[in-house]
Amino acid sequence: MISEWGRSRHFFERSQRSLAGGVSSPFRRNLAKTLFFKDGSGAEIQDVDDNWYTDYVLAWGPLILGHKHPAIVDALRHAAETPHNYGAQHELEFVVAEQICNLVACAERVALTSSGSEAVQLAMRLARAYTHRNLLLKFEGHYHGWMDSALLSYHASGPEIGEARKPNAVLGSRGQVPNAADNVIVLPWNDLEVASTLFAARGEEIAGIITEPVLCNSGSLMPAEGFLPGLRRLATQHGAVLIFDEVITGFRMAPGGAQSVFGVTPDIATLGKAIGGGLPLSVVAGRKDILELMVDGGVVFGGTFNGNSLSLAGAHATITELSRDNGRSLGDAVRSGETLMNGIREAAKRRDIPVVVTGFGTAFSVHFTERSALTNYRDTLHDDRALLQFWLHECLKEGIYLLPDGRMYTSIVHSGKHISRTLEAFDRVLARCPAGARR
């Protein structure tokens, strides 16, 4: 049992005197404890108090190869001895672009940038330029970055949220301009009937549909059967652009992304996190006629760090590893994660604690809920948040490092030993849950 975090506490006190909030991303304040780290290897991470953890945070998703994978270390060592950023073209740009085009179904052309939020902005701009329309359809609980035009109805609650089948477009932040919601329509996810009704009424106004193909950011919820194909049909019938936000699912669910798993090809996909293996990189991939609007169609896009040498070295190494042997390592990681998912369900059942585990093997969520099935964001509002917080804190003491919303990421280096050790720790934590948590 881990009980000493004195050095992390000291570092946090010091960091608050210079960093806003003491952290570089305010989301990190929501973790069970604000820890400072100094090392990591494979599936494990070490804090400044010399405690080691099995890491299911994985830098919030990017480390699909784990910490310090030899292929990435070698690639970065070589890249460090060359110019870090040319601000001009170099070979790795088209080499990585070719890798993506060979693996991702929608990718006839790609554009390189640095963050998922940037990639989404470009995708939405391209959809509007291509269709000469303004309206975009997004879904409740889906996170497409923190910028004004995208941060709508992410984690809304209370009276502002509106009716279940006619939700409001709720601003996500103070300081966000109110008219950010003027050109966005928000609907419940996994309800094709509601989406069809909207398109029947306003299809000629809608530039595009943007969705996470798996709702990873709000509970790791899977799409209902027929939902994603239905969105594809609606977009095609009404001349709208279908955008898959695969910042999480891309190069984590499969080398070809969720679109390859579900057999639904969007017009544009945003990729990020895992694609860089821990380096800052995001990608917009899509149809040639849409993406070439950046060249001769008046769509403005740019970035000093786009295609920088270090990020693309990490991406090239990552994609090469994940695509080897027809994606065998990632397929094995998904199956290993499914073993962990099933083990959590079985442990909760033995302890008579209501738990639902949703998602897929390398990105899933643990819900403490009486509900038997979760299909959309509103279903997750019934989760027992207090019990989740208890579980997160107790897991940390057991050396299991988890995200604050109960989400878990696994990598290709999470071994059977890690899975067994984690399930043993979870069982001990579930045994310590308050009596009121049991059925």
Image: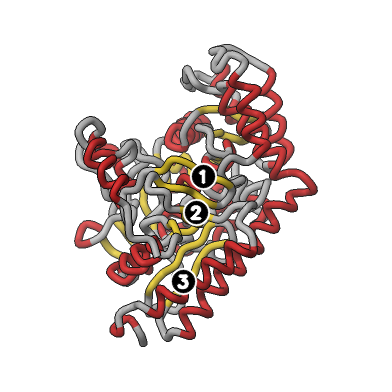
The front one of 279 and 98 is: 279
Mark nearer the N terminus (3 vs 1): 1
Residue at x 60% of width, y 35% of height: 285
Image quadrant in which the N terminus is located = bottom left
Cβ–Cβ under 8 Å for marks 1 and 2: yes
Q: Disc 3 versus disc 2: distance between alpha carbons?
A: 14 Å
Task: Answer left or right for 294 relative to 185.
Answer: right
Residue at x 34% of width, y 48% of height: 35
Mark 3: few, some, or many residues within 10 Å (few <14, many ≥20)? many
Question: Residue 162 sits in which quadrant?
Answer: bottom left
Tell me the residue that label 2 is attached to: 55
Task: Answer left or right for 81 relative to 370.
Answer: right
Describe the colour scheme in one phrase: secondary structure
Secondary element at tag 3: helix
Mark 2: few, some, or many residues within 10 Å (few <14, many ≥20)? many
- Which is more foreground, mark 1 or mark 2? 1
Name the mark on residue 40: 1
Name the mark on residue 185: none
Image quadrant in which the C terminus is located = bottom left
Tell me the residue that label 3 is attached to: 426
Residue at x 36% of width, y 78% of height: 432
Secondary element at tag 2: strand
Q: Is residue 128 visible?
A: no
Task: Answer left or right for 390 relative to 42.
Answer: left
The x, y position of residue 389, in whole percent, is 31, 65
Task: Answer left or right for 312 relative to 185.
Answer: right
Residue at x 50% of width, y 67% of height: 358
Residue type beneath disc 1: Gly
